[in-house]
Image (cartoon, rainbow, N blue to C red):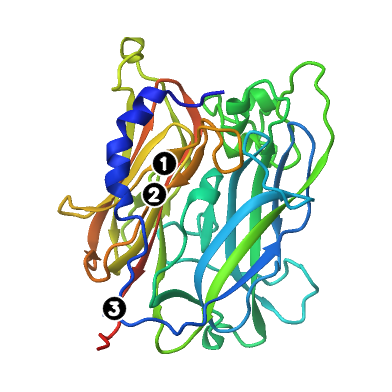
Amino acid sequence: MNFVSLDWVLSWAILLLLVSLSSMPYLSTAFGKTKNNVKSAVFLSPKIELGPGYVSNKIYYDVEFPRGHIALKSFNAELIDEAGNSVPLQETYLHHWVVVRYHQPKNVSHKSQSGIIVVRNNGFCQGEVLGQYFGIGSETRGTTTYIPDPFGIEVGNPTEIPYGYEEKWLINVHAIDTRGVEDRMGCTECKCDLYNVTKDENGKPLSPDYRGGLECCPDNIRCRLKKGFQGPKRSLYLKYTVMWVDWDNFVVSAKIYIFDVTDTLNKSKGMSPKHNCKVEYDVEPCSKGHMKGNDCVDVKKTSLPMQTGGYVIYGVGHQHAGAIASTLYGQDGRVICTSIPKYGNGTEAGNEKGYVVGMSTCYPQPGSVKILDGENITLEISYNNSEMHTGVMGIFYFLVAEHLPHQHV
């Protein structure tokens, strides 16, 4: 099944080629580097059991993760079966996985949720929304996450862990088994009618305008199957690979920012500004008169102030099927980073036809791209809207270093 037309995909080929020039980590000898002691470990999530059409959307607490005062360099993940084989998206769609850091009292039982203090990233959303350190979706196999030297994400600093607490990690995995379903794209977009969902997780009726999204594909629900289809239950795992270095004076801390295109900033007199991140939205179809052209493009944008700026060292967008591009702009209109989706054209894992199987990344030369304190930055998200898409996302993940390392001769 084709999720997107070939015409507009080809029209972006030149832009993708240009963006790819900035999609490799910048290797610098002038700025110094961390010691050559990068460590790597591969872990498995708890077992994920899925039958045809079923959804698994669970949170796994206290998962295996490197310990100590370290600098994270990359986090990659994919779904595998019990034999260790990569599972293609047309069989099980990986809607998203997210990794969250938290502190918890030492005396609680294993995997307990008692006393948890979530340690959020640096912005922009608030509360329990988009607070992860890493997290993407179907594009996971084809998206580079490596953080170039001498930068890294600092975790495990004992001075930041409250007395009597320890640092732990959780992973949320949202997977949809699409074997034998009536409408594979509709299931991956969590269309409510295909899941026969009319109420949210609290039993409150959904708005008639809510046609699809996370509310309609919660844990342990099933998308509509083709009549008579039967298939076996299978056991899967999220295999995740973490790279890191021990923290030392050579490492420069990188701060995590996640920008949601649905975010709006509510300001009230005498109150701190409050972010309203909805995370997902619908893309309405263009008019019939434009269906055969190349101008069926839905553009959504929002602007927010960056309280504390710095030097951008990495950037990448997260979008769903139908995506065209994600672009982050500075206040003067300069392009900070553009991230372009890559679509598969085969059946093998990592190259599934019609799915977003990768997002291009930005690695500016350190010091070349700076966001000023208080600068308004703008996120622009574009989707092809020759057909409707429900529950899409327009999220931009970028890393900022508040200072540059001392130059080494």
Q: Residue at x 52, y 88 (%)?
A: 159
Q: Residue at x 60, y 33 (%)?
A: 347
Q: Are marks 1 and 3 in contact (CB under 8 Å)?
A: no
Please state if 311 lies on the left or on the right of 384 as rendered: left
Q: Which mark is residue 403?
A: 3
Q: Secondary structure at mark 2?
A: loop
Q: Secondary structure at mark 1?
A: strand
**Cα–Cα gap, marks 1 and 3:** 30 Å
Q: Are marks 2 and 1 in contact (CB under 8 Å)?
A: yes
Q: Secondary structure at mark 3?
A: loop
Disc with the residue nearer the chain's start (3 vs 2): 2
Residue kind at label 2, given as amino acid type:
Ser
* Residue identified by numbered label 2: 360
Q: Residues within 10 Å of mark 1 (few under 14, many from 20)?
A: many
User: In the displayed structure, would residue 393 be above or below residue 70?
Assistant: above
Residue kind at label 3, given as amino acid type:
His
* Residue identified by numbered label 1: 341
Disc with the residue nearer the chain's start (1 vs 3): 1
Please state if 72 lies on the left or on the right of 188 as rendered: left
User: In the displayed structure, would residue 162 be above or below residue 285?
Assistant: below
**Cα–Cα gap, marks 3 and 2:** 25 Å
